[in-house]
């Protein structure tokens, strides 16, 4: 027997037309380099999206062509997301924080036909344009009043490009499995690798990530995605917010500015936001220094790296804001698990159990099948003890990388590179990355757990733990720590902090205080750089 249901394609165009009709008067607020507070509605946005689609066609672009963007989170970038993908083209979000060589590589590898750029990144592209002969031209995301002088070939002002275009456009019927966007991994080892999302995978991820036990967005929310739109489609929030009818607030180049974020939260009524731990630390530091509050803010999602307990506690105890862990990766669109601990759970649990629960990365969301395997590939039980490699599969998880014939998913399962265990409540706890785990005297040590413990010290702003070769123990953990401004702490005090909090043989064998730690282009600690720098570290006890 066959279904009697209509066979409607799952495509991004449907999100746009739905939001335009049902939530057309909901606001989109942006910070841009040429406007400190741009404000319009979804209907205004999608009217300009149609004008942009006409402009793209006039440039000679056609379905399946790839268009690059180097842009912050703002309304023009939002317009590009929808105009490119809904026209049947592929939106290639380029991370401007990458090294020049990586930006050149991914623009060339993706075969970008045109590149749209914020004014801030014009200089980067001027340096690279002669190495990108296949890029036909560049569009600068500003108006004529702020258009910079540039040597970029065929440079066009964005507002001029769309100004005289019609406000109607006949959107093509798209195969839901056709490519909608491409995002490259940050390339910490080797060249960055491209992950190509489809319209179908994007919509399924949008549904799954919006469920109540994930982002839980509704038309009563005001959401501010601080996670960059150049990184995994802004965790999908630029699709799920219009789908849910939530007001969208985008901080543009101010995404790391604690004062600017607090102002946006309070003045625009932000209820939910998402970003990496360093963003929330910057917001906390500003709030504590200024004495301001964020009373309308309800919840923050943190991902990208493990979040220290001190951030959870500070937001909850001082500002009545719930911090929720999420985990995922570029190859997963990106959300894989989400931890939405009940607000009142702390009233019925011991402090230790409540802390443990909050630090979990969470349960898999629908659409993500997850398993933990040992070194022989055998699946491990979800007993809260058995730790192994995390593997995933599902309809919005990549099978292979762009222009690579072989599958990235062995036996149908994608190897995430994370080490974790699952507890009896189906909650995942990441214990390390497979490349970061430390093996000392034949036993495994979690660098993440040591880092979280270190950052819980009030004098420490940020910490990293790496394994360094040791003549007796094979490897020993070395702690690298950044001290808060105005704080003082000795090496002995720092190492003593671990006593009673972790196993004695886990305690770092030494500590080095540094002014800053290296980060990848997506804001994660760059353990690779640290391992290279400290590979010949001399142990005192060696």
Image (cartoon, rainbow, N blue to C red):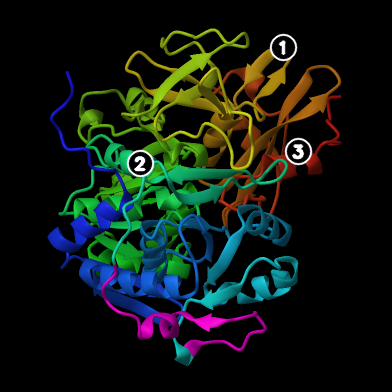
Identify the residue at horizontal 50%, vertical 34% (top origin): 398
Residue hosting label 1:
442
**First in sequence: mark 2 or mark 1?**
2
Please give the count of numbered marks on the rendered protein: 3
Residue hosting label 2:
200
Label 3 residue SS = helix
Q: Is residue 338 magenta?
A: no
How crowded pointer 2 is (Cα within 10 Å; few <14, some 14-19, many 20+) is rated as: many
**First in sequence: mark 1 or mark 3?**
1
Identify the residue at horizontal 16%, vertical 26% (top origin): 3
Residue 490 versus residue 100: which sits nearer the camera? Answer: 100
Q: Hey, which residue is sitting farthest bottom in the picture?
A: 145
Mark toward the viewer: 2 or 3: 2
How crowded pointer 3 is (Cα within 10 Å; few <14, some 14-19, many 20+) is rated as: some
On screen, 32 above or below 511?
below
Residue 295 in sight from this viewpoint = no
Q: Quadrant of residue 356?
A: top left
On screen, 429 above or below 224?
above
């Amino acid at each position: 027997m066959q279904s009697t249901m209509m066979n409607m394609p799952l495509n991004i165009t449907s999100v746009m037309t739905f939001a335009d009709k049902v939530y057309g008067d909901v606001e989109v607020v942006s910070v841009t380099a040429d406007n400190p507070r741009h404000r319009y509605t979804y209907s205004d946005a999608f009217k300009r999206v149609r004008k942009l689609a006409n402009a793209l066609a006039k440039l000679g672009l056609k379905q399946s062509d790839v268009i690059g963007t180097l842009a912050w989170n703002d309304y023009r970038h939002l317009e590009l997301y929808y105009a490119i993908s809904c026209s049947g083209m592929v939106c290639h979000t380029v991370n401007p924080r990458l090294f020049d060589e990586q930006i050149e590589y991914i623009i060339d590898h993706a075969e970008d036909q045109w590149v749209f750029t914020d004014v801030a990144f014009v200089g980067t592209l001027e340096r690279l344009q002669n190495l990108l002969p296949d890029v036909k031209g560049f569009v600068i995301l500003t108006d004529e009043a702020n258009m910079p002088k540039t040597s970029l070939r065929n440079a066009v002002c964005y507002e001029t490009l769309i100004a005289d275009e019609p406000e109607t456009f006949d959107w093509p019927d798209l195969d839901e499995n056709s490519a909608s966007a491409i995002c490259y991994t940050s390339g910490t080892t080797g060249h960055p690798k491209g992950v190509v999302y489809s319209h179908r995978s994007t919509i399924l991820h949008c549904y799954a990530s919006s469920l109540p036990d994930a982002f839980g967005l509704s038309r009563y929310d005001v959401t501010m995605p601080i996670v960059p739109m150049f990184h995994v489609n802004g965790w999908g929030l630029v699709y799920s917010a219009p789908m849910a009818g939530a007001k969208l607030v985008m901080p543009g180049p101010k995404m790391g500015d604690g004062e600017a974020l607090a102002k946006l939260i309070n003045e625009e009524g932000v209820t939910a936001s998402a970003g990496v731990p360093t963003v929330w630390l910057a917001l906390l530091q500003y709030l504590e220094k200024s004495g301001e509050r964020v009373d309308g803010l309800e919840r923050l999602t943190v991902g990208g790296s493990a979040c220290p307990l001190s951030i959870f506690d500070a937001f909850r105890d001082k500002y009545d804001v719930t911090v929720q862990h999420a985990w995922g990766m570029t190859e997963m669109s990106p959300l894989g698990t989400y931890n939405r601990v009940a607000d009142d759970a702390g009233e019925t649990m011991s402090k230790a159990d409540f802390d443990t629960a909050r630090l979990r990365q969470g349960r898999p969301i629908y659409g993500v099948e997850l398993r933990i395997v040992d070194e022989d590939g055998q699946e491990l039980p979800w007993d809260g003890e058995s730790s192994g490699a995390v593997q995933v599969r599902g309809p919005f998880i990549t099978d292979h990388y762009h222009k690579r014939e072989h599958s990235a998913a062995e036996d149908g399962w994608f190897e995430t590179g994370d080490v974790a265990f699952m507890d009896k409540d189906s909650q995942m706890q990441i214990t390390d990355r497979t490349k970061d785990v430390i093996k000392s005297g034949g036993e495994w040590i979690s660098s993440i757990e040591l880092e979280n413990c270190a950052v819980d010290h009030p004098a420490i702003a940020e910490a990293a733990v790496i394994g360094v070769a040791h003549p007796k123990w094979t490897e020993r953990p070395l702690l690298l720590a950044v001290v808060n401004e105005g704080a003082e702490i000795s090496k002995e005090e720092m190492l003593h902090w671990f006593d009673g909090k972790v196993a004695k043989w886990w305690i770092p064998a030494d500590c080095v205080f540094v002014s800053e730690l290296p980060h990848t282009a997506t804001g994660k600690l760059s353990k690779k750089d640290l391992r290279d720098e400290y590979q010949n570290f001399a142990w005192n006890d060696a």
